[in-house]
Image (cartoon, rainbow, N blue to C red):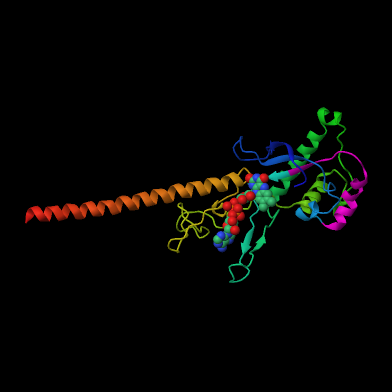
Amino acid sequence: MIGGVEALTFYKSPNSKDPPDWPDAEIIMVAGSYSSDQGTGLIRGANIRQDIYDTVYKPLEDIIEDYWSVLIMQFRPKSRGYLKLRDKNPWSRPMFYPNYFHHQWDLEVLLEATKEAIRISQTPAMKALGSRIHDIPLPDCAHLHFGSDDYWRCSIRTLSYTLHHQVGTCRMGPNGDRSAVVDPELRVYGIHRLRVADNSIIPNPITAHTNAASYMVGEKLADMIKADWKNDQQKKTKIIFDNEDSFFKSLFNE
Ligand SMILES: Cc1cc2nc3c(=O)[nH]c(=O)nc-3n(C[C@H](O)[C@H](O)[C@H](O)COP(=O)(O)OP(=O)(O)OC[C@H]3O[C@@H](n4cnc5c(N)ncnc54)[C@H](O)[C@@H]3O)c2cc1C
């Protein structure tokens, strides 16, 4: 992350078929730029190539001005990625295949949200602060007219990275759904006494960042386990009563 989040807004694409109150993207405005730490760490976090930094962002290092940047986060992307186990060693890191922009829709939502962010940057309030767009083109996109839709599409494909909101790698679903790993009580199908309680069980990407959702998953499972234990205890208690009952009955009968 470049700097603290100063402001954010939600964006609804005019082509969206989802309910009106479901935004398609979040426009996050943060202080600073990739040059704020002179190219030492931020570009590694965002996986920005050194030659891109040197051409586009490094020139900002020498200019004493304030910068702000926009991160655009799409909600409910239609592209689907997957992960694969590297080998049988449980400590080996899995391999992620995010498959960004496999579905054209995602690129178009981000393009429209980018244009909305530019519109915001050009409002009188922002202009009064001297806000203007940094217009050194990305080397990979320099063949396209800066500011055209195709330029921004190229820029989106070039600069995209994760905000770490992966879900659905261990998705919850009904019995018989071959893509489901856990049932609605988060029990792993086919394995006795194993549950999963983290964001991996969320079947589809949510319209939010994912941290609060992971707490909700954990809290919900804690409630379900407590309910199961209570039921078990009641059953056990009932067995004792039954036994005592039958014990006394047998006494009276005798
Ligand atoms: C850099 C970064 C910034 C983020 N910023 C935000 C933010 O601002 N707002 C927001 O809402 N979300 C944010 N997120 C996302 C949020 O942190 C995650 O969605 C959330 O932590 C996921 O929780 P989880 O419980 O599903 O997974 P995790 O927090 O990853 O927990 C999984 C746990 O399982 C353990 N584990 C893994 N394998 C095994 C195993 N085989 N056996 C036993 N234990 C195992 C791990 O050690 C880990 O403790 C951010 C994520 C990152 C990485």
Residue 68 counted in the magenta span: yes
> Could you tell whether 161 is left or right of 186 in the image?
right
- The residue closer to the viewer here, 57 or 157, is 57
Which residues are drawn in magenta?
Answer: 49-71
The foreground one among 175 and 169 is 169
Identified at 65% across, 40% down, the residue is 16
The picture places residue 85, in percent across and down from the top left corner, at 61, 67
Question: Left of 45 or right of it: where is 205?
Answer: left
Residue 125, given in percent of the width and then of the height, sits at 81, 28
Q: Residue at x 89, y 44 (%)?
A: 135
Relative side of 88 to 229, left or right = right
Please state which of residues 174 and 66 is positioned toward the viewer in this rendering.
Answer: 66
Relative to 141, 79 lies left or right: left
Whole-percent x, y for residue 222 in the image:
46, 49
- Which image quarter holds the C terminus? bottom left
Residue 167 visible in the snapshot: no
Magenta-colored stretch includes residue 224 = no
Number of numbered tags placed on the structure image: 0
What's the residue at 70%, 51% (across, down)? 104
